[in-house]
Image (cartoon, helix red, strand yellow):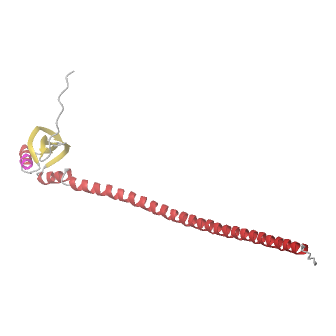
Amino acid sequence: MTRINLLPVRAAKKKETAKQQIIIAVVSVAAVIIAGLAFYTVMLAKVSGTKDEITRSEAELQQLKTKIGEIDNIKKLQAEVKKKLDVLNMLRKEKSGPAARLAKLSDITPDKMWLTNYTENAAKVTISGLAYNEDIIATFLRNLQGAELFSDVELVVSEQKEESGVKVKKFDVTCNIKGLKKEETPAPQKK
């Protein structure tokens, strides 16, 4: 009978299995290394993209800050313009106020009369001045009454006075401004 020696086949099979296991181990390690490198590359790309996005966002933030600064300046300018417009509107309203009354008073003042004082307190006006005679004062009072700006014209004082060696009449007149409410005077307090 013939005998076959199977031992070298087993040893060859073991060698073959060992080779396959080594190849599988090397392939597995290579696959893990490749997967790790791929993961590292993807993460590196994400980090780089995030850094670029941060840089763009910071640049955009700086642009927005400059725009906000410009908007703040525009708001300040707008507030200044509004204040100026309010002043202009107030001046327009006051145009018919004291300046217009003084202009009208100048127009109705007769010759040979000088006004020395003009005071407005709410709706009450006090006018003081000098004139050559009572007729000029009377003309002035009639002119005031007919001026459509003043009402309740009343001569308070008329007295003779000497100014620079010339005898003149000193006078005080009170009246009310038409269209303005009289300021209420407080009641006298008892002590």
* Residue 16, picture quadrant: bottom right
Q: Quadrant of the N terminus?
A: bottom right
Q: Nearer the viewer, residue 154 or 64?
A: 64
- Residue 22 at least partly seen: yes
Q: Quadrant of the C terminus?
A: top left
* Residue 159, picture quadrant: top left
Q: Nearer the viewer, residue 87 or 67?
A: 67
Which residue is at 80% across, 70% downward?
21
Above or below, 169 against 27 in this view is above
> Majority secondary structure of the magenta segment?
helix
Which residue is at 90% across, 72% downward?
7
Horizontal and vertical percent position of residue 92: 22, 56
Q: Nearer the viewer, residue 100 or 81?
A: 81
- Outermost residue to the bottom: 2
Horizontal and vertical percent position of residue 14: 85, 71
User: Which range of residues does the magenta coloring cover?
Assistant: 141-145
- Outermost residue to the top: 191
| In this rendering, position of residue 34 left or right of residue 59 | right
Which residue is at 28% across, 55% downward?
86
